[in-house]
Image: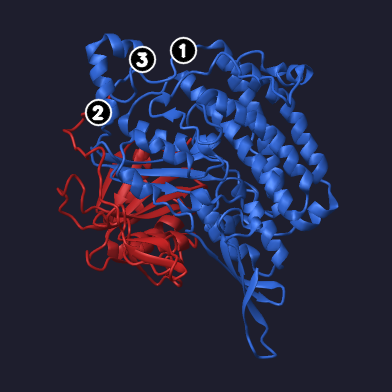
Chain colours: A red, B blue
Amino acid sequence: MPLTPEVLLDRVNEALGDKVLTSKIAQDQVTIVVPVGDWLEVCATLRDTPALAFDLMIDLCGVDYSAYKEGAWDGKRFAVVLNLLSIKRNHRLRVRAFCADDELPILPSLMEIWPAVNWFEREAFDLFGIVFDGHPDLRRILTDYGFIGHPFRKDFPISGHVEMRYDPELKRVVYQPVSIDPREVTPRIVREDNYGAA
Amino acid sequence: MTVTSAAPSAEIRNYTINFGPQHPAAHGVLRLVLELDGEVIVRADPHVGLLHRGTEKLAETRTFLQSVPYMDRLDYMSMMQNEHAYCLAIERLLGIEVPERAQYIRVMFDEITRILNHLLWLGTHALDIGAMTVFLYAFREREDLMDVYEAVTGARVHAAYYRPGGVYRDLPDAMPQYQASKKKNESDLRRLNENRQGSVLDFIEDFSRRFFGYVDEYETLLTDNRIWKQRTVGVGVVDADRAKALGFTGPMLRGSGIVWDMRKMQPYAVYDKLDFEIPIGRTGDSYDRYLVRMEEMRQSNRLIQQCVAWLKSNPGPVISDNHKVAPPSREAMKSNMEELIHHFKLFTEGMHVPEGEVYAAVEHSKGEFGVYMISDGANKPYRLKLRAPGFSHLAGLDEMSRGHMIADVVAIIGTLDIVFGDIDR
């Protein structure tokens, strides 16, 4: 069975020292927040420290916090979240770093540490516009060829900006502004703490 | 396939060739730009995203319950396993318990789904390499399992059966039977309905008794088949360290000899109470991954048998009685004011999940399928990230296919077991 989260957090703190800004244990999962400047160093330590040995990069994704709790968020807007797994030691860790600049979120690429981040960084770039410095091939991956904008940002409408149709006169596919009106069936409501908890 | 450009010089003979997105061996909508030196692959650049529907963004605008059917449409060959990961994430954030019977039902359907997925993989992989018969055999068994899906959920593919807190309903007491028609006479009907006389569980039990023999049939056709071995042995070799570095999970990782299975190492649902084994490969080539998946089907079948035995003797509730998460029964809703309010609130506003974040993963047929969910306390997820196993696997295609022939790319795509629903999301 995996380590208890408390022991894992102790080991992480031991290995990283004051590079851990905040840490949290919830649902038996450990989350640490690290400064963006130490991103590469932290990840290399997590992989190479024998007691931690995070050898498998499970997931990397971007998060846009600008609409968190209906705009109650006052931290940095963009974060990158890394979910790591150690097959050797059988434990997991979540690492988060907030990008310093909201206008141009930028972070060093982890390609040298886990080659598996390749497409995950391309995805975060495509969907959130987070730039990974040092990535050898930072192209869009999921959106259409020639797509403009970063669709998973909270200020990007769910219907998008353009729609595509076949034009019988031009005899080709054309793009035009969307004709759908935004519609919300169930409004988003934030209730008081523990409203829905068992 | 179309040759798009050829270098004019006589010495340099690199071609760029476009494979897909509508090539039958591309398994959906894979567009592959291959750079060739003669017939040898120099570089493979998969262009994905042709099936991108923005599921994660859509989920941010739907209540937690409304997103369950979207999960079926991710990896549309392992429907219920996707739902399982999604429900696990919500349940962990809410901190609710799932009734034991629901957990056994979930495990049983996860394994039925694994067999469904592996049968499709086996059939199409063999078809790509030139063996037609296996495809027909595999679909014969898929038909039975999809009938089970239909009997329990009403849908053959997109089930929407799991709910946060349990499953939608208990297993039905009767298995639907074939009806007489112009094509089916009395004796056909008797034969077809022979194993459909009892409950759904009886039908599944009958299937699992037969299934070991079927797996042996597929193995007779392929395992020692000279053509099959020539096309798969030594093709797409990934050693253990590379498999980890590339982020492989599931059979792709086990085929390279790493003992890792979420069901054993970090068990969820009731896997820790059941008896099964994890097959691993040795060389990390396509043939070893084939052997691993074949054995996984047998192990899944064992798990199904254990679940059927438990479910037959242990009746009970199949969904949580916390009515802030799961709806009350129809009778209670019609006779009790409080239950009526619960029902109304649940299906209009939806459940509220406490603020926090969680990563929940299951051992999916293809690898580790994970749901990373951030909730800010609203009735909709703030951010939902779906970790699709096929995404990492396809990213490794470039490395796996370098130095191989064009025909081997087809064999490697087959062994990756990719489905675009989950790669593109």
- Distance from label 1 to label 3 (Cα)? 14 Å
**Identity of the residue drawn at 37% across and 55% down:** A61
For image coordinates 31% across by 57% down, the residue present is A160
**Element assignment for label 1:** loop
Q: Disc 2 marks which residue? A: A196
In screen coordinates, is B222 left or right of A148?
right
Q: Share a chain, discs 1 and 3? A: yes
Q: Is residue A44 visible to us here? A: no
Label 1 crowd bin: few (<14), some (14–19), many (20+), radius 10 Å: few
Give the side of residue B102 with respect to residue B311, left or right: left
Q: Amino acid at mark 2?
A: Gly
Residue B238 found in image quarter: bottom right
Position of residue A110 in the picture relative to residue B415 (left or right): left
Between B61 and A46, the residue placed more toward the observer is B61
- The quadrant holding residue B393 is bottom right
Q: Amino acid at mark 1?
A: Gly
Q: CA distance from mark 3 to mark 2?
A: 19 Å
In the displayed structure image, the side of residue B233 where residue B35 appears, left or right: left
Please name which of the two marks, 1 or 3, marks the residue nearer to the observer: 3
Q: Which quadrant of the structure image shows residue B382?
A: top left
Give percent across and percent down for residue B262: 52, 39
Q: Are marks 1 and 3 in contact (CB under 8 Å)?
A: no
Residue with the mark numbered 3: B329
Q: Between B184 and A161, which is closer to the camera in this rendering?
A: B184
